[in-house]
Image (spheres, rainbow, N blue to C red):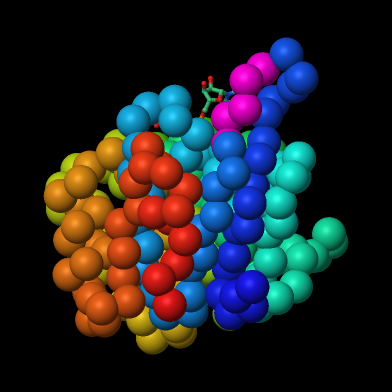
Amino acid sequence: MQTNGLVGQGLWFRYSPRHPWTVRDISLSVGQGEVVGLMAPSGYGKTTLAKLLAGYLSPHRGSVLVEGNPLPRRGYCPVQLIFQNPELTVNPRWRIERILREGQAPTQLDRLGVHPGWLRRYPHELSGGELQRVAIARVLNPATRYLIADEITAMLDANTQAQIWQTVLAYVQQHQLGLLVIGHDAALLKRLCVGGASPKENRILDLTQPTTALVPQF
Ligand SMILES: Nc1ncnc2c1ncn2[C@@H]1O[C@H](COP(=O)(O)OP(=O)(O)OP(=O)(O)O)[C@@H](O)[C@H]1O
């Protein structure tokens, strides 16, 4: 079995024994420095799969390994998930400066357009787009090795979307992070995942295809 990268192997998950399987025997991998897209219709289990890969949920069967090791049970997780709704990932009772200090010091505040004046505010005192920049800045730090971006710019205008992706992709490339981009927008995924600096390695996975289509072609 492959030991490099972030590897989900034979993953099965359902929310309870009364629910049907949401994730059925999915295997996929993201290598260091690789940008992989993941698309499927709404309700197909993309976010659930992202939560399995980032350790928010545990698979009923199968494994998630990072460089051959299970995800750490405590401390900062090297696989970080950014959601469409940033308010779900930040503590509403903390000021922005404390949220940003939660992991290691973020490095991209300026480039993401995080205004110093926001630092003393609480999350509900920022707009959705402003808070999303904070959520992204929080995870762009040296302890993050893999990033899962689940529809992270869906609520932003085109200019802000472009600024955020430019910053994230430059950071990913410079630090050789693995990036899994989840989305419905095929054109955006294509731009991000196959138009990059190393198009040979980058892929777009379609969750509606048989799982063999998701197995890495290394
Ligand atoms: N906590 C939960 N309890 C029970 N069912 C859930 C829960 N979260 C999600 N589901 C169900 O699991 C299925 C997959 O949801 P998921 O959010 O993973 O899909 P998705 O592909 O990310 O959808 P979208 O593109 O609309 O965000 C859906 O049918 C959803 O209703």
Q: Of 58 and 163, which appears nearest the observer?
A: 58
Q: Is residue 210 above or below residue 44?
A: below
Q: Residue at x 59, y 79 (%)?
A: 4
Residue occupying the far right of the picture: 74
Q: Is residue 38 above or below residue 173?
A: above
Q: Is residue 202 left or right of residue 70?
A: left
Q: Of 22 and 105, which appears nearest the observer?
A: 22
Residue 168, given in percent of the width and then of the height, sits at: 36, 68
Residue 21 lies within the magenta run: yes
- The residue range painted magenta reads 19-23
Residue 159 lies within the magenta run: no
Tell me where residue 216 sits by quadrant.
bottom left
Residue 70, given in percent of the width and then of the height, sits at: 76, 66
Inspect this view and state whether residue 14 appears: yes
Q: Residue at x 36, y 81 (%)?
A: 173
Q: Of 136 and 8, which appears nearest the observer?
A: 8
Residue 176, given in percent of the width and then of the height, sits at: 45, 83
Q: Main secondary structure of the magenta part?
A: loop
Residue 126, given in percent of the width and then of the height, sits at: 43, 40
